[in-house]
Image: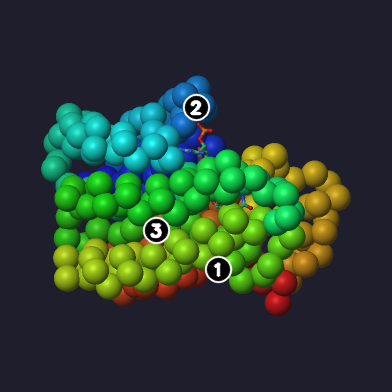
């Protein structure tokens, strides 16, 4: 059985991806930062549907804990699924900060850097020894890397860095037959950055060719494809999943 790790699997895109992957027969280790109840609800829904999942606490901004996290994942793989290797990693956890460039604080900058670039870099490095041949890495970036959106400069810059990092992962892990791709969502209905109000949603829908904002499931479908056999020949790509945003 394939087993994957999804960071930030307690809510939004991560939760939707966890449930979909479990329905497709994958074992899921999902992480949360502070919302243990939401994470355990996702695990319960997966179990009720006949799947298997485990929720683990992880702050992706705290690199010092990644060695311990790898040991916990290794133990969980063995105890829950009787396997030694991981088949996928989704670097999904994230938060948003809206602030014009001229007033972004160093703490906001560092917080976004740690979660959206440094965290995925060192978490992938930490979990690499557990990844088997044919494993798939999916990094969540953002359509804000293509369309400059006032108020999210550092977030978009670090997501752009993650796009570049994705290609380096694909290059360096290719000899082990590990693929790496990025999924770049447009505006998706989640709680990121405080979520969408009606006015904001209407504006984003009007900027989208298909006339609506996205749902977490719209993104989960693409992530699940990249994690599975259907995605076997897709490598080093960024796939925008945005319904035709600002085209
Ligand atoms: N929604 C959008 O419009 C959109 C657009 C482009 C890209 N994205 C990207 O898609 C990914 C998922 O976003 P989402 O919209 O699903 O967000 P969300 O609904 O706000 O969920 C965020 C998830 O990340 C976790 N998380 C937050 N900070 C963390 C940290 N420091 N360490 C570990 N986990 C942390 C949260 O855990 P807790 O529940 O414990 O807090 C939660 O599970 C993010 O990388 C985001 O940047 C989203």
Residue extending farthest top:
37
Label 2–label 1 contact, CB within 8 A: no
Q: Secondary structure at mark 2?
A: loop
- In what quadrant does ligand 1 lie? top right
The answer to whether marks 3 and 1 mark residues whose Cβ atoms lie closer than 8 Å is: no
Residue extending farthest to the bottom is 247
Is residue 57 found left or right of 69 in the rendered image? right
Using the rendered image of the protein, determine whether residue 13 is visible from the camera's viewpoint: no
> What residue did someone put label 1 on?
240
Q: Is residue 47 above or below residue 98?
A: above
| Rendered position, 142 above or below 113 | below
Q: Is residue 229 left or right of residue 33?
A: left
Task: Please tell me which of labels 3 and 2 falls first in the chain.
Answer: 2
Which quadrant: the C terminus?
bottom right
In terms of sequence position, does the residue under pointer 3 or pointer 1 come before the other? 3
Residue positioned 82% across, 59% down in the render? 203
Tell whether circle 2 marks a residue whose Cβ is less than 8 angstroms from ligand 1: yes
Rendered residue at 31%/34% (across/down): 65
Crowdedness of circle 2 by 10 Å Cα count: few (<14), some, many (20+)? few
* Residue tagged 2: 34
Q: Quadrant of residue 49?
A: top left
Q: Residue at x 61, y 71 (%)?
A: 146
Q: Which residue is mark 3?
A: 138
């Amino acid at each position: 059985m394939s087993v994957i790790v999804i960071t930030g699997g307690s809510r939004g895109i991560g939760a939707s991806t966890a449930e979909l992957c479990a329905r497709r027969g994958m074992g899921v280790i999902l992480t949360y930062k502070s919302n243990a109840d939401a994470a355990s609800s996702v695990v319960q829904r997966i179990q009720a549907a006949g799947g298997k999942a485990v929720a683990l606490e992880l702050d992706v901004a705290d690199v010092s804990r990644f060695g311990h996290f790898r040991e916990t994942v290794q133990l969980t793989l063995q105890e829950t699924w009787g396997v030694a290797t991981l088949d996928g990693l989704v670097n999904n956890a994230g938060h948003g900060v809206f602030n014009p460039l001229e007033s972004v604080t160093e703490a906001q900058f560092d917080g976004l850097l740690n979660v959206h670039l440094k965290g995925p870099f060192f978490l992938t490095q930490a979990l690499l020894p557990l990844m088997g041949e044919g494993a798939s890495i999916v990094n969540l970036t953002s359509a804000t890397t293509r369309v400059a959106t006032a108020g999210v400069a550092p977030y978009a810059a670090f997501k752009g860095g993650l796009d570049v990092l994705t290609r380096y992962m694909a290059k360096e892990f290719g000899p082990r037959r590990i693929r790496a791709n990025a999924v770049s969502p447009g505006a998706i209905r989640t709680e990121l950055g405080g979520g969408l109000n009606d006015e904001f949603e209407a504006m984003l829908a009007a900027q989208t060719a298909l006339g609506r904002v996205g749902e977490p499931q719209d993104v989960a479908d693409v992530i699940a494809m990249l994690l599975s056999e259907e995605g076997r020949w897709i490598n080093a790509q960024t796939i925008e999943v945005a319904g035709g945003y600002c085209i």
